[in-house]
Image (cartoon, rainbow, N blue to C red):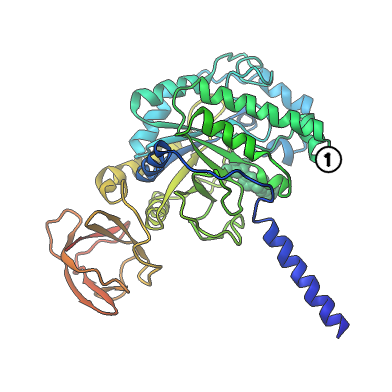
Amino acid sequence: MMKKIGLICLFGLILFSANAQKKYAYPMPEYTPTAGNLEAREEFQDMKFGMFIHWGVYSILADGEWVMLLKKIQKDNYSRLADFFNPQEFNAEEWVKIAKDAGMKYITITSRHHDSFSMFDTDASDFNIVDATPYGKDPLKELAEACKKEGIKLNFYYSLLDWRRDDYKDGKKGDEEAWNKYVGFMKAQLTELLTNYGEVGCIWFDGHWDQKEANWHYDEIYSLIHKLSPNTLIANNHHIQPIPGDDVQTFERDLPGENHGGFNHGVEVSQLPLESCATMAGKWGYSIYDKKFKSTKQLIHFLVKAAGKNGNLLLNVGPMPNGKIQPEFVDTLGEVGEWTSKYGESIYGTRGNVVGSQDWGGTITKKDKTLYVHVLEAPSEPYIFISEFTEKIASATSFDGKTKVKFKQMKEGTFLYPGKDFDASIDGIIKLKLK
Ligand code: H79
């Protein structure tokens, strides 16, 4: 009996600690987003598709952004990479064009990753691209200008975790003075990022999970951001339930509510704008070994499914150390762009969660009175049955509106009969107009 009680207690304790890690344990001030912030959230949701960029001195080693840790490279040796980081072929306008042609509406770039190297002009650390490399210029400045010119929103990824700084390391061990110093350092850098680059769409934090129980001083950090720039959204890839002050909820390598990557276990989908991030191959940072390229079709499906779940897709490229984006990615993005330029109407500005998950392997997006039924697999029957969908349909057609699609509605749901020429090889779209 005692043994049984002990086991139950142990089980309870495990559950309790697992849940404790899904919440931030420190008090946060109540947060009321400004009208401008709420508008920015809507705009963010309308954009649907962004380019994630992981670029840093790690790119030189062409083995992903975790190479310093995974290959156990000592700090001093890692610093040497900066001595020959000289991306002469970097051209911000070219990157922006690649993103824009793919149908992406925003760019989120690593300003500083876990390796502590700042990809921008900062006074808070010498280990930065302007002071420590022969390149000597600030690529984020150039990117900000190119984005502004082309109407692309610019966001900054910012790592909370740091593999190089002593104040982080000592703070992690419990040295409060060191920890406060580290928090001060982050605040100084965030102030630079929010004042020197024009309007910033979003600050995208990452690394919380390195210290799940720590006091990250989000109360100070978030209020600093919201005070300096109230319309800048805060996304924090913390893998826990949203914290007061978060403006966007992120899902790493997964669709909202799913947990294939193992990062989103026990995290519930909130009412905030949602964003899934994903890689084009396996790694985030450039890797010469990574050949797990996702196909154009897979990526389009990710975008469509994210939209169906009311989320955005932030799709990553890891540019090479010379500043170019590798040709495999450019080619695939070009193909994705052909699709978005034809069918973007069914994605941009839409909202999702019209119906729950469906047997026919598809999803629905909605804009005003128009619904886009995305059929992602060739139907096994001559019809598609959308269970529990009973809103009254005025007309059903092919995407171009030229061919009528038969339909039948009953209290259990709606039947659509796409006809024998229906092509669902990538995404067969049926357009419904509601009454
Ligand atoms: O910035 C990207 C990653 O570096 C960072 N977040 C994205 C957006 C990140 N992804 N996962 N993690 C951090 C958590 C750590 C995962 C690990 Fe591993 C699994 C660390 C060691 C094993 C993956 C595989 C990363 C390195 C090897």
Residue at (71% x, 45% y) in the render = 210
Position above or below: 79 against 173: above
Q: Residue 141 in the image: state x and y as whole percent.
A: 49, 20
Camera-nearest residue between 415 and 46: 46
Q: Is residue 416 left or right of residue 331?
A: left
Q: Say if residue 364 shows up in the picture.
A: yes
Q: Residue 419 in the image: state x and y as whole percent.
A: 18, 69
Q: Say if residue 290 shows up in the picture.
A: no
Single out the residue that lies furthest toward the right: 2
Q: Is residue 312 left or right of residue 399?
A: right
Query: Is label 1 within 8 A of ligand 1 (CB to nearest ligand atom)?
Result: no
Residue at (24% x, 68% y) in the render = 391
Position above or below: 188 against 407: above
Placement of the N terminus among the 4 image quadrants: bottom right
Q: Residues within 10 Å of mark 1 (few under 14, many from 20)?
A: few
Q: How many marks?
A: 1
Single out the residue that lies furthest toward the bottom: 1
Residue at (58% x, 15% y) in the render = 135
Q: Residue 297 in the image: state x and y as whole percent.
A: 38, 53
Q: Quadrant of residue 373?
A: bottom left
Position above or below: 274 against 412: above
Q: Is residue 1 left or right of residue 348?
A: right
Placement of the C terminus among the 4 image quadrants: bottom left
**Amino acid carrying mark 1 in the image:** Lys
Camera-nearest residue between 234 and 237: 234
SS at mark 1? helix
Q: Residue 387 in the image: state x and y as whole percent.
A: 32, 74
Position above or below: 61 against 293: above
Residue tagged 1: 173
